[in-house]
Image: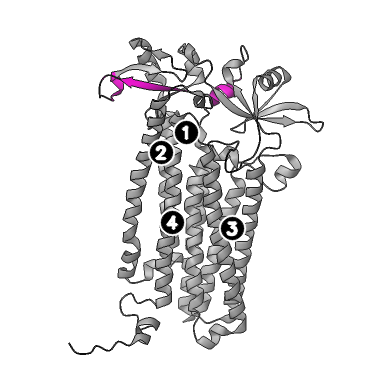
Amino acid sequence: MSDTGAETRRAIYRTALILTALTTVEFIIAFTKQYYAGWFGISESTAHSIVVATFVILTIFKAFYIVAEFMHLKHEVKRLAWTILVPFIFIVWLIIGLISEGNYWGKQASADQPGTSKTEMIWRS
Amino acid sequence: MADVSVDKKALIEGERPIFNASYGKLMMWFFLVSDAFTFSALLIAYGALRSSSVSEGLAWAKPENVFTHFPLAYEIWHLHWPLVFVGLMTFVLILSSVTMVLAVEAGHRKSKKEVGKWVLLTIVGGVTFLSCQAYEWYHFINGNPDGAYLVNVNSLNGIRVPALDDLSLVVLTPEHAGESHEHGDVTALKTADGTAITNPDHIKAILKRANHWHSGVFVLSAVDARKLNISGLTKTISVQVYPVKDTEGKIVGIRLNNGFPISGEDVVTPIVQAASKTDGGANLKVNEYGPPAFADLFFFVTGFHGTHVFSGVVLLLILYLNVQKGTYERRGHYEMTEKIGLYWHFVDLVWVFVFTFFYLV
């Protein structure tokens, strides 16, 4: 039995290492992202989109390791795992719906009142 | 129909018929799913408000300009280290997740001593995280002691500050022929002060340089705007700068909102003179970093997460006391460690998302 315990602990330390590595990669990107525009001729907005997409993918990887290993869901019966995971398709729908809705609000606002004093405070976001 | 007798005890306490998980763990999972929905709603609200803010003219705050304080480095040497402190907080929370899962593993071996040790270390991690959060909130609320200055770049006639030029942006709203929204069909570009650019060659030259933001507007750097001779923009560009003072309170330099320092009296003095002052810090109505919704969501989301961490610390304290009292030894299993562990990992999981969407993106 003590043998299986050692195996579990190895898996824990491996997961911890992976999570730390992924976070470190995120930090390196966060500190260097301002220099990416211009590489291979990509524009600033393309570089920004690539960086955001990378952050999201790394975050999903981290979430997977936390849920699968630390929360042990990978080792539960499949029925339980699916019962917990499937409801999150509603969240995917909500993300798609509300982000495009947010863009629409912004467009409406700029269409309603072009050039009002609000526009005086523009700095790079 | 014959009477069907149901063994309620078996249903509740552990025949484990469907999911091969105990009632308690199952209910913890279902609670966590509902809690994940709450956090998702908050983060999605953040995304929706953020993506709407650009074309309203009040661009979102840049996290690396907001979260720059690090204990001692700031207090003693007035250094700004963007995102380093939040990185430390993330690391503390991941570590506390590791000690938690080690406690669960020790529980499987029914090793009272080890469970106690790892749970105690997890509590230390949780309390450290909460203390870090208190420090971060303190600086977020108080902000820059001298407030910030909003500088209109084009009011600095004749003074060239390249870093300022880099920071400022010019937003152009396109007008299209009919219903078409193709780039080639842009018939006019409207600047923020209402001037319309209609010359096709001029539009073509601008669109070649401009970035198209997904909210539909085109954005030019101030440098390009000047090159392209867009004159209707002279009142539209403002950027945020922070004064840097010497020990006697005299302004000796300024720090741009991307952390870039500028010194030299010939540049600093006219910039400060041309600027309008804003109060430092943040509350629910105004803040120095961006739109009010930015601070509101910061308080609500990190506050809600901090409340979860606090609840987790309380649960862990109860767990620790019960471990020491031998409650679980008498019970014959350490399942309570697993249930509280699930909750603790969930708190870590939420932080992974908060960290990405609040601090990195």
**Nearest the eye: B39 or A28:** B39
State whether discs 3 and 4 lie on one chain.
yes
Q: Chain of mark 4?
A: B
* Distance Cα–Cα, label 1 vs label 3: 30 Å
Alpha-carbon span between mark 1 and mark 2: 10 Å
Chain label for disc 3: B
Q: Could you say which disc has been placed on residue A50 in the image?
A: 2
Q: Which residues are magenta?
A: B161-185
Give, as a three-letter code, the residue at label 4. Answer: Thr
Which is more foreground, mark 3 or mark 4?
4
Q: Is B179 a magenta residue?
A: yes
Chain identity of mark 2: A
Q: Residue at x 39, y 35 (%)?
A: A105
Furthest residue in direction right, as rendered: B248
Q: Earlier in the sequence, mark 1 or mark 2?
A: 1
Residue at the image point whose x is 34% and y is 61% from the top: A85
Residue that sits furthest to the left in the current view: B1
- Mark 3 vs 4, N-terminal side: 4
* B79 lies left or right of B32: right
Q: Helix or strand or loop: what does disc 2 sit on?
A: helix
Q: Viewer-nearest of labels 4 and 2? A: 4
Q: Are marks 1 and 2 in contact (CB under 8 Å)?
A: yes
**Label 4 Cα neighbours within 10 Å, binned few <14 / some 14-19 / many ≥20:** few
- Please state which amino acid type lies under the numbered disc 2: Ile
Label 3, on which residue?
B92
Q: Position of residue A38 (x, y in %)?
A: 45, 28
Using the image, tell me which numbered label, if any, was put on residue A118.
Answer: none
Q: Which residue is mark 1?
A: A36
Q: Residues within 10 Å of mark 2 (few under 14, many from 20)?
A: some
From the image, state whether disc 4 or disc 1 is nearer to you. 4
User: In the figure, residue B7 lies in which quadrant?
Assistant: bottom left
Indicate the secondary structure of the residue bearing disc 4.
helix
